[in-house]
Image (cartoon, rainbow, N blue to C red):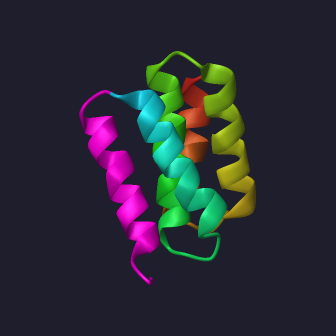
Amino acid sequence: HDLAANSHYWIGETFYGEKNYESAILAYQEVVKNYPGKDKVTAAMFKQAMAFREIKDLKSARYVLKKLAEGFPKSEEAKKANELLKEIK
């Protein structure tokens, strides 16, 4: 369905809001993996990196942020990713 990517993204947002970061990471990964052409991919990648940061997995957070910035350089999330990369060294 056309809204499936949105559904998975919002499932991730729900988990994130509940501080269930591991489940949020998995939900965001569903968007990235299964809906590569959809608008929510960049948002899912950014929030996935944020969730990794929350669980103190900075290596994974940096990896996702770099992949986002390189893969979608013109997106608004890429700008945020580059700013966040400066913060988490």
Residue at the limit of the structure toward the top, as seen here: 56
43 left or right of 10? right
Residue at the limit of the structure toward the front, as seen here: 1
Q: Quadrant of the N terminus?
A: bottom left
16 left or right of 69? left
**Residue located 42% across and 39% down the image:** 24
**Residue located 67% across and 53% down the image:** 69
Residue 28 seen in the current view: yes
**Residue located 54% across and 60% down the image:** 31
18 left or right of 51? left
67 left or right of 22? right
Question: Quick check: is 46 in the magenta stretch?
Answer: no
Write the start and end of the magenta stretch as one range. Answer: 1-19
Residue 89 seen in the current view: no
Q: Nearer the viewer, residue 83 or 8?
A: 8
Q: Nearer the viewer, residue 44 or 30?
A: 30
Q: Quadrant of the C terminus?
A: top right
In the rendered image of this protein, does residue 44 appear above or below residue 21?
below
Q: Nearer the viewer, residue 62 or 9?
A: 9
Quadrant in which residue 61 is drawn: top right
In the rendered image of this protein, does residue 38 appear above or below residue 81?
below
Residue 34, given in percent of the width and then of the height, sits at 62, 65
Question: Quick check: is 10 in the magenta stretch?
Answer: yes
Residue 73, given in percent of the width and then of the height, sits at 67, 63
Quadrant in which residue 54 is drawn: top left
Instruction: Determine the main secondary structure of the stretch shown in magenta.
Output: helix
